[in-house]
Image (cartoon, rainbow, N blue to C red):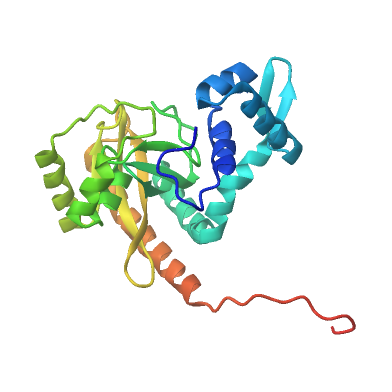
Amino acid sequence: MPREGTGPDFIEALARGLEVITAFQPRHPVMSLTDVANATGLARPTARRILLTLAELGYVRQQAGGFALTPRVLDLGVAYVRSTGLWDVARPHLEWLVERTNESCSIAQLDGSDIVYVARVSVPKIVTLAVQIGTRFPALQTSLGKVLLAALPPDEAARALAEPSRSGLVPVWQPARQEWEAELREVRARGWALTDEQLARGIRSVAAPLRDGSGRVIASVNVNAHAAETPVEVLVDDYLPLLLQAAGEISVDFARLESVPHTSLAPSRAGTP
């Protein structure tokens, strides 16, 4: 069956291939052909052809019990992070921030009603939720997401939040529209966001925006702490000034990167140095 909402240029085979890759979820690293077909809604022969094609390309391997993804799949996500240049710019500033707070720090961007982590420097602490590059959480219940939603026009933020989350997580805080609108107005007015166990018990964080050379918010950066170890007062009074400093420096460096002319080097002709 054709996918809904397709246009004349839509390549259904490519869409099906991506659906097969994303069918592999946490705690299901190995899937049988039947598992993949059931998870994607594809016929078994179609799922089999896609899996064998992905195996030939190096994204999937066959093993006892079925099929498993290979590390090459990471190239798909890393390509995005590398293409923006944000990680290379942000890394030293995140490391500086982690060194001074002894807390994990992350950068995320908005995707529908979720945030997706695109950079992270962590410290070895036990937290309620595991986070890594590519982790997805509902945006409204995170400090990172509040900053990103507050940067949007109100009607655009509402449209984003109307999309269903793909995080698979049910957050603690379930606000009515009037409540979250007031929250975003406050974040917009003060320029940073705080979340205190709204996503999950034991997690609190503070976040600030990252901007490009035109002043547009392109991502957000946070300091994340365990609620049992770090009071809100420490987050706001001690960590927030450091966070705002790091966010400003990342934004300046990113704007500088954008302003550098990018040239492509054509292959030299034979005999030409």
Q: In which quarter of the image is the C terminus?
A: bottom right
Q: Is residue 253 left or right of residue 192?
A: right
Q: Check the image and report above or below for 12 versus 91.
A: above
Residue 28 visible in the picture: no
Residue 243: quarter of image: bottom left
Q: Residue at x 47, y 77 (%)?
A: 259
Task: Spot the residue most to the bottom.
Answer: 272
- What residue is shown at x 52% (from left), y 27% (from top)? 40
Q: Residue at x 56, y 36 (%)?
A: 16
Q: How many labels does the image show?
A: 0
Relative side of 99 to 265, left or right: left
Up/down of 150 relative to 178, above or below: below
- 85 shown above or below 131: below
Quarter location, residue 217: bottom left
The single residue placed furthest to the right in the displayed view is 271
Q: Residue furthest top?
A: 65
Q: Position of residue 115 (x, y in %)?
A: 37, 43
Q: Nearer the viewer, residue 236 or 4?
A: 4
Relative side of 226 to 119, left or right: left
The location of residue 235, given as percent across then percent down, is 28, 43
- In terms of depth relative to the viewer, which is nearer, 261 or 92? 261
In x, y percent, where is residue 7?
45, 50
Q: Can residue 178 be seen in this view?
A: yes
Q: Position of residue 76 (x, y in %)?
A: 59, 46
